[in-house]
Amino acid sequence: MSGEKSRSKGAAHAPAGLRARKKRLTYQAVSDAAIAMFLERGFDKVSVAEVAAAADISKPTLFRYFPAKEDLALHRFADHEDEAARTVAARADGESPLEALHRHFLTGLAGRDPVTGLCDAPEVLAFHRLLYGTPALVARLYAYQGRSEAALGRALGGGIAARLAAGQIVAVLRILAEENWRRIDAGESAEQVYPGAVEAAELAFVQLRAGLT
């Protein structure tokens, strides 16, 4: 009897898992098509209808996936919205939230994670120039960061103190990434920027620890 229940449960979950995977693939395919067009012609010169046509879906269907045109370009940030919160939740026993976030950021720098700003791969450079060169995308990015703050605040325990701490942490991570990107955009390589990026991260987390005891 228990075996029958287990099989029934597995059968019920299989279609749901398949649908979720298909949805993720659709998100990725539509976003990739949009970004390619934005990079080629500029964000403001590409219409949502053109993106829908390129992705072979209707415009209403596209809006079910992406509520705003800006989300087409920023989809790749969606997976990172709760990254800080997940890092805090998954930290080792005895490790403080700040220690976990500090370690995670240094790991990202060493791995040249684009989220840290320390990545000079041509496709990443092109995307960052599109992002920071388009006011509408920069404005939309702040909405993503707001949700990141909210998720981190909940991971830190909720309440006003946690929200204030989350706001400071997310702001610090953003400033570090923007500074790394600024230097790379000015012509330095990721290898050249890396030592200074680590030093800046150390300074930032020292200041956070001093203020967020």
Image (cartoon, grey):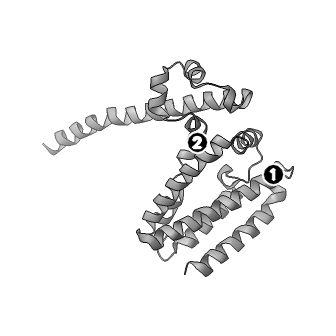
Q: From the viewer's perspective, is residue 51 above or below residue 184?
A: above
User: Which image quarter is the C terminus in?
Assistant: bottom right
Q: Label 1 to label 2, Cα distance in Å? A: 20 Å
Amino acid identity at mark 1: Ile
Horizontal placement of 91 versus 17: left or right? right
Instruction: Say left or right for 109 vs 170.
Output: right
SS for callout 1? helix
Q: Quadrant of the N terminus?
A: top left
At x 58% / y 42%, what residue is drawn? 76
Nearest to the observer: residue 94 or residue 7: 94
Q: Residue at x 50, y 34 (%)?
A: 66
User: Is 36 on the left-hand or right-hand side of 96?
Assistant: right
The residue that appears at 67% across and 27% down in the rendered structure is 37
Q: What residue lies at 58% left-to-right and 37% top-to-bottom?
A: 70
Residue 76 numbered tag:
2
Above-or-below relation of 54 to 117: above
The reply to whether discs 1 and 2 touch (Cβ–Cβ < 8 Å) is no
Read off the residue under disc 1. 184
